[in-house]
Image: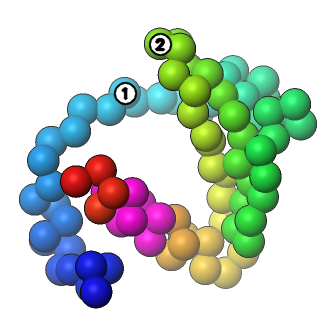
Amino acid sequence: RWLSKRPDDIERLPEITLPTISYRELLHVTSNFSEANFLGSGSFGSVYKGIIADGTTVAVKVHNLLFEGASKSFDIECTILRQIRK
């Protein structure tokens, strides 16, 4: 299975330059995580729509770290997204 790759294999992915977005900017682009920008929720948090400074529409996932397993879920999602970007 592709999820069973060793962590050092993941680190060898091609360099991808992505913007760094501050929490303050995330608050701004989601209108303080307003209901108007709410897209949905799952087991560990909610997702909001935002439009960053360059005009790109983004989905901002807010994890509720009070739920057991939320951090592990986040790590798994990041691994999957890195694989998709290959």
From the top left corner, tell me how far across and down residue 54 is, in percent. Answer: 47, 13
Tell me which segment is drawn in magenta.
76-82
Q: Is residue 20 visible?
A: yes
Q: Nearer the viewer, residue 45 or 81?
A: 81
**Is residue 66 among the parts visible in the rendering?**
no
At label 1, the amino acid type is Pro
Q: Are marks 2 and 1 in contact (CB under 8 Å)?
A: yes
**What is the three-letter code of the residue carrying label 2?**
Asp
Quarter where residue 38 is shown: top right
The crowd level at tag 2 (other Cα within 10 Å; few <14, some 14-19, many 20+) is: few
The disc label shown at residue 19, or none: 1
Mark pair 2, 1: CA separation: 10 Å
Image quarter of the C terminus: bottom left
65 sits to left or right of 5: right
Q: Is residue 40 inside the magenta stretch? A: no
Residue 6 in which image quadrant: bottom left
Q: Is residue 78 magenta?
A: yes
Instruction: Name the residue at 24% across, 32% down.
Output: 17
Query: In the displayed structure, would residue 64 be above or below residue 38?
Result: below
In terms of image quadrants, where is residue 16? Answer: top left
Identify the element where label 2 is drawn. loop
Name the quadrant of the N terminus.
Answer: bottom left
- Tell me the residue at 44%/71% (across/down): 76
Q: Is residue 13 above or below residue 23?
A: below
Classify mark 1: residues with Cα within 10 Å, few (<14), some (14-19) or many (20+). Answer: few
Q: Secondary structure at mark 1?
A: loop
Residue 47 at x, y percent in the picture: 71, 48
Residue for badge 2:
54
